[in-house]
Image (spheres, rainbow, N blue to C red):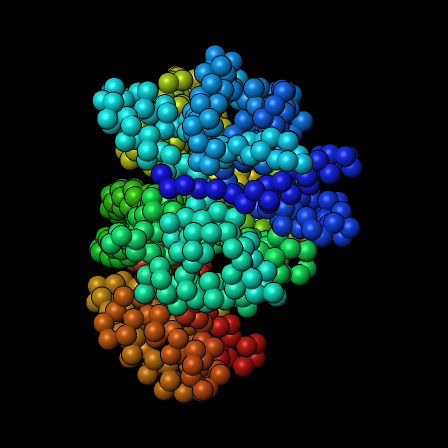
Amino acid sequence: MREQNWNRDLMEQILTLLQFFQTNGIPFERAAGPEASELLVEHPEMRAAFEMIRFMNEIPGGFMIYRAEGEEEIVYANRGLLRMFRCDCWEQFRALTGGSFRGIVHPEELQAVEENIKKQVYASQFDLDYVGYRIIRSDGTVGWIEDYGHYVRGESVGDFFYVFLGDATERRERQINEQALSDQEQLRRLEVIKGLSINYESILYGELERNRLLPYRLSCRTERQFEEGFHMKELRWYLANYIETWVHPEDRELVREQTSPEYMRRRLAAEETYYLNYRVIYENELQYLQLRVVNVGEPGHVDQIVMGYRRVDEELQREIEQKQMLTDALESANLAIVAKNEFLSNMSHNMRTPLNAIFGFAALAKEKAHDSPSVVKYLERLEASSRQLLSLIDEVLEVTWIGSQDEMAEDECDICLIVRKTCDFQRPQIRDKNLDFTLDCGGVTHRMVRSDKEKLGRLVNYLVDNAVTYTNPGGQVLVTLTEGAARNKGSQTYRLIVSDTGVGMSQEFLDRIFEPFARERNTTLSGVYGMGLGLTIAKYIVDRMGGSIQVDSTEGQGSIFTVTLQLRTEQDAPAAPAVVKPDEVAGLRILLVEDNELNREIETEILQNGGFIVDVAEDGSIAVEKVKNSGPQGYDLVLMDIQMPVMDGWEAARAIRELEDPMLATVPIVALSANALVGDMRRSMESGMDAHLTKPIDVARFMEEVRRTVRRPVPGQGVL
């Protein structure tokens, strides 16, 4: 190993400065603090020593100075050494070690360590001595230290050791666990450890205004610029010569820019230290170095700096590999998201389109078959089966939404009305099973809340459907909505409890009840048709709303689901939207935009039976032209499919909204599509549509939305 030395005069200055601080009652751990800075005003000759102490407090490794005689008292220890012993302050470190070198070394090794150091010092008073030993940390654990020290005989301050210490615990433990190596391998490894253990191979002190640089420690590279001596050099000359001599050609511009005095002043004015990584070529080997620049001058004035150089080959290589891994993972994730969204959108459309025909023809047949109870009964069963199939499709599609972090809406809604409408949707199944069903919202005072109305309705539906489905005929289902104490102003705590006297669940199954596709054996054998996704989605909705859900169940006796939500409240209920009554629709014109002939036939007949005048368009471009040329009276509503040839529904809606005639551009537009994902609905709103209905058509809800959205006739003036 190349001979390394320190400036003896500087070391004596450091020791003199530490004694000076001790005399003035300043703990050495604050020797580089603001109170110590004031002492330099009277003793400017100690500035270099002062700046060196500040730098030592910044290096990541350990550093200490201790007396060579007597009790070997430690006169200085940096923060890195305290961290190695897991101490928060000097007082804790002194209580642990007695404030001496002897207190640092493990008692079982102290004698051998001190003899080893004496032998090395006797053999050579110029080289660093090396010794490795165990330590006992503040938490009682044992660690390993690598100790590089140098003996200094001072004429005025006495004899001292200054020591660099590195934490070798991980490496030592790895060596112990590995197979025994041969003597030659052990020696070679020791040389590698010695070469890498000292954190900074070069340390330089510079003054920007005076353009000078003083070396404190030199490496095989920096010693060339200083002619292997510790002599003052011009800062700008050194930087230029170092870059041209050592830095890789591709990195020279970067290093030249970030080591210029102008850049240092600008960067260090904003932060106390910064670093840059670059490459050098040494003996035909590419190496990675890190230069750390620290501001050690007066606060608010960047002049005195310390520059430290160290090898970072392994660290930088790991960083490059990790960045590449993250880049690859992000690219793969983005491709997967695009593929998943496209697949779900197509699957939703292709499955819902034929189901629309089933629902539509079933509704029309029921309406015209009053004289045939048997036909009505069969059609009702057909409709029930279709709804069951649609429910399964909705669950499969919605479970894919889990984890997508889709935004939660902030709708103004009546929470009691949402619960009541959801329960009404279950009435046919409740009647078929002759259940004793009770809904109680009497405990709610603040009905108007802000929440995601659609997802809140789905949550209630999944819980009520689960209770109705798994309760035997003649059983009981109770749905209770109550309001608790407010946590903060403007919000209330709501508790939804859904209890039943159904088949119940075992305690073992309750641990995985919210897992996708989870169904217990007793419910499966009961003949209940389902996929076990409803409660998974319900749990996710509750989590996204920041609430909680609890389950209590006894096998054979029933279950109780309790959902607690914190929701923002509204003081005044919103005005109910105006709805055109069935006897007011005569003469109102609707443009139905649908590329599927079968769907056009069904939807046209439903609308005509409702009293509307219906015009049709086969794609979006035809729809835009029809609206544009519809005259001053125009249409009162546009029902727009989404996936169509030539021009899709979203493009058509945007084109209509851009028409010059405000009467035509503001015509109500409702999406009527098999695209049922949340993202599709949001895109419809962004394109200018007023609502988004999904296929298959629920005739009652469909007609209610049409009458709510269509332009109302002006009293006394006929239709618009």
**Residue 583 % position (x, y):** 47, 66
**Residue 564 % position (x, y):** 55, 35
Residue drawn at (49%, 83%), measured in percent from left and top?
662
Say whether residue 596 is left or right of residue 7.
Answer: left
Most foreground residue, 491 or 122: 122
Say whether residue 129 is left or right of residue 262.
Answer: left
Most foreground residue, 48 or 491: 48
Q: How many marks?
A: 0
Residue drawn at (33%, 44%), measured in percent from left and top?
314
Residue drawn at (36%, 23%), measured in percent from left and top?
173
Say whether residue 202 is left or right of residue 26.
Answer: left
**Residue 643 % position (x, y):** 27, 66
**Residue 291 % position (x, y):** 45, 53
Most foreground residue, 354 or 714: 354
Q: Where, quadrant-wise, is the N terminus in this rendering?
A: top left
Residue drawn at (39%, 68%), measured in percent from left and top?
253
Say whether residue 122 is left or right of residue 343.
Answer: right
Q: Quadrant of residue 701?
A: bottom left
Q: Mark yes or no: residue 94 visible.
A: yes
Q: Quadrant of residue 269?
A: bottom right
Q: Residue furthest top?
A: 108
Q: Mark yes or no: residue 437 visible.
A: no
